[in-house]
Image (cartoon, rainbow, N blue to C red):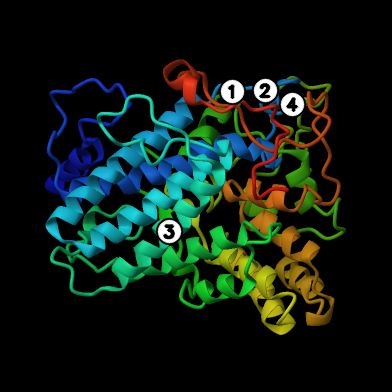
Amino acid sequence: MKKLIYILLVALTATGCKKGYFDLNENPNQVTTPGLPSLLSTATHKSGINSYNVAGITSYFTQYLANPVAGAATDIYQVVDYSGTWDALYYAMADISDMKKLAQQLGSSEYVGVANVLLAYNLSLVNDLWGAAPFTEAFQASILTPKYDNDKVLYDSVVSLLNQAITELTKTDATIKLAAASDMIHGVILPTVQDSRPKWLKTAYALKARVLNKVSKTADYNAASVLAAIDNAYTGNADDAGMAKFQTRNNWATVALNNAGNTLGGWLSEQLIDHLNGISYGIVDPRISKITDLPVGGVYIGTVNGAGNRPPNNNTVKDECYVSGNSPWTSATAPLLIMSYAEQKFIEAEAALATNPTRAYNAYLAGINANMDKLQVPSADPLRVAYMAAAAVGSANLTKDLIFKEKYVATYLNPEAWNDARRYNYQYKNFTLPVNSVLSTFIRRVAYPTGETSKNGANVPDVAGLDTRLWWDQ
């Protein structure tokens, strides 16, 4: 066991050396020529952490989170420098690119396939935050100031990477099989190494369905292609892609722990809490007790975005709701979810709604139940029984509004929720602009980081404002 822990720690610190236009210092203690298993550990770990890094930004825009300080920049749509998140995403892609190149040299279709999935995922996070960004020239050591590919080109690159991943992961004759013990998303750290290739193939299809569905507001949208991808994707919660190997604990659990020590972070928005506590929809969602803890006043209360802590108490009085370390979603050992079966079912419901209402309705109910199960709400819980009865509207009465209502809960703290909010034009019930918002409309993008404008400013596109829409958000 001690040997296994040592191997994992080495794997977590292993990275490639030359990262294109990144100025990385040499670390004499790092593995300078890591093998595929070490690169797999690094790539899967960083990708999981990046889901948290990005959600730490976007969860304020979707009003899952709110700042206890009135007028906080992220809450009210001021320009914020996200250089750290940008760098984390590009460092991850640089490592993944190293893994892909080595896998190609060694003839491992399985590692190439996983690399393409992870590149697609991290690139999509960049694309969804900033739109245009470097990619085709980003990982060439000779290019210090890479050009920016426009946001549509990046989207097409994501789709292409996922298609390539599916091709490679369908193969069963790889010269080098995935080292599942080094796979921190779909692998199993057990004495007996298990095959994670089939799970990665399902994730490639699930992410493809997500990405194809994202363009629902454009002429490029093809619901049949979305459903075709889903037919080959997840079949249950056990297929979920999540990273749960931490040096200490889940990052959201650290937020909860710091909050308990009055460091103050992870406050939940009034929008989310009223979505769950019966105020917005007239029925209590039993998942609320699995997402947050009951405040000292005995009533679930959220924080208004932009307004900060509610008077008359100071912000160290635990009278509002916070990210909970007791939640199956954000506990110390909970995975940082990249893609879930529940989300996939709501994608299916949306894509099938116009042509196959029965399929859409069954997927909608399955999505709710899958998320209830994921949050460990007992099936016999009277609140769950009542909630499911209210949700059982029949296929003829299923609407896009109901699908988005439920998907909002299922994608709690997932970066994808912001894409949904923009596709849905923020039309969730009672969803309002933050107090003292600097924009007259909801935020649509973030500003390019200062670290990038200082290093590669000649290539950084001009952006009119944070209400400027990306190509698919028209």
Distance from label 2 to label 3 (Cα)?
49 Å
Q: Splitting the image into 4 quarters, where does residue 198 fall?
A: bottom left
Residue depicted at x 57% and y 30%: 260
Residue depicted at x 57% and y 59%: 375
N-terminal of the pair, mark 4 or mark 1, is: 4
Residue depicted at x 71% and y 49%: 421
Residue under pointer 1: 262
Proximity of marks 4 and 3: CB atoms separated by less than 8 Å? no
120 lies left or right of 326: left
Q: Nearer the viewer, residue 387 or 232?
A: 232
Q: Secondary structure at mark 2?
A: loop
Q: Residues within 10 Å of mark 3 (few under 14, many from 20)?
A: some
Give the percent coordinates (x, y) of residue 356: 71, 82
Which of the two discs, 2 and 3, sits closer to the camera? 3
Q: Amino acid at mark 2?
A: Thr
Q: Which mark is residue 160?
A: 3
198 lies left or right of 60: left
Q: Splitting the image into 4 quarters, where does residue 383 fall?
A: bottom right
Q: Secondary structure at mark 4?
A: loop
Q: Secondary structure at mark 1?
A: loop
Which of the two discs, 4 and 1, sits closer to the camera? 4
Give the percent coordinates (x, y) of residue 211: 55, 58
Residue under pointer 4: 76
Q: Which mark is residue 316?
A: 2
Proximity of marks 2 and 1: CB atoms separated by less than 8 Å? yes
Which of the two discs, 4 and 2, sits closer to the camera? 4
N-terminal of the pair, mark 2 or mark 1, is: 1
354 lies left or right of 341: right
Q: Secondary structure at mark 3?
A: helix
